[in-house]
Amino acid sequence: MSKIPTPQNPLILRALRLMDAFSKSNDERDFLLDRVEGFIIFVDLDKEEGDLIALQKELDTNPERYCTIPKLTFYETKKIMEGFVNEKVYDIDTKEKLLDIIGGKEAREQFLEFIYDHETELEKWQQFYQERSRVRIIEWLRNNNFTFVFEEDLELPVHIIEQLKMKLFDAKVPKEVQQGRTQLIKKAETYYSNEALNPRPKRGRPPKQVVKIEVETQITNDIFTQVPTSVRRFLHQPDIQTANAITFSENFDSEEEFLAHLRGAGRSDAENQLEALSEKFASLRKLSSQLGLEGELTIPSFGDDDDDDEEEEAAAPHKSKRKPKK
């Protein structure tokens, strides 16, 4: 640790990546945050044994450099769900149903499936979960004495943020970079205020319901200059543009995966098999067309029976009729 230079300004962290790591950390997946540059390490046990041994050696050699991201316990997940139901759900029947789900088996997955089936509750849940996750992450960073800012909160030009990353350890920097450092230091202080852990609700009449437009945050490139060789293959750098892409599920890593699961769960096995067959025959049709075998290869269609009957009736007048023998 002593050989590593000292950062000259607060670490620029990605709040969405930290939220993702916090949601995925469990007994089988470990995540760590670097104190020097702020990169995230995912201890992927599927990597080669030699890489894992080298990583463990680095962690043992510099234990003060890496901070283990805490795992989300069963008690915490239950408190999050109960907090949402008690604070944000107003319909009595919906509230009772959700509380029953929370008290049952596979509560997290069942809870999410119910929420995603009720659009009015989904939007409230996503906002609630994001706010709770942000507070939990800030509290953890404070308890571990990180001096930081979230890149998503910065209002600096992209090229200035990238310069701040590149010159993180330089004592002398250009004037505009020094001005950026001054802003980072002021911004970092806000995360240690009381309001950071207790956001004040907005007062006044709630705004009219409008179509919510998800705006992608402008994010700079990853710039790390002090990553040990043994750590490089374990860098956790997911491209997450919106908080809604991060799921509360413990079985699915992204909202896209979870939605695909929901679509599959809503259909019967027969429907799933039929779709799979249709896709295979569509591939065969394309292949036969490319090989010039369209007239030779007959592929069955899975259309409606009524359509087949209409086609047969349309073709009937063209069939030759035999004259009765005299």
Image: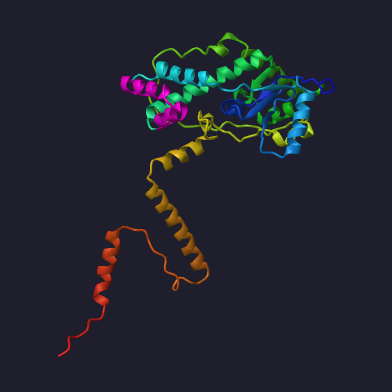
Please give left or right for residue 4 compared with residue 117 in the image. Answer: right
Q: Of residues 172 and 10, which is closer to you in this image?
A: 10
Any part of residue 283 in sight: yes
Say which quadrant the N terminus sits in.
top right
User: Image height check: is 323 above or below 254?
Assistant: below
Q: Quadrant of residue 136?
A: top right
Q: Is residue 100 magenta?
A: yes
Q: How many marks?
A: 0
In the rendered image, residue 126, in percent from the top left (x then y), is placed at 47, 26
Residue span colored magenta: 91-116
Can you say which quadrant of the picture contains the C terminus? bottom left
Residue 45: % across, % down: 67, 35
Residue found 69% across the figure and 33% down from its top:
235
Determine the main secondary structure of the stretch shown in magenta. helix
Is residue 217 one of those drawn in magenta? no
Q: Pick the residue in front: 133 or 150.
A: 133
Q: Residue furthest top?
A: 194
Q: Give the residue at the far bottom of this rendering.
A: 326
Left of 160 or right of it: where is 203?
A: left
Q: Residue furthest left?
A: 326
| Residue 84, percent from left and from top | 44, 19
- Visible residue check, residue 131: no
In the rendered image, residue 296, in percent from the top left (x then y), is placed at 45, 73
- Above or below residue 136? Residue 236 is below
Q: Residue at x 62, y 32 (%)?
A: 219
- From the viewer's side, name the closer residue of 95 and 156: 95
Quarter of image, res 226: top right
Residue at 51% over, 38% down? 257
Front residue of 139/112: it is 112
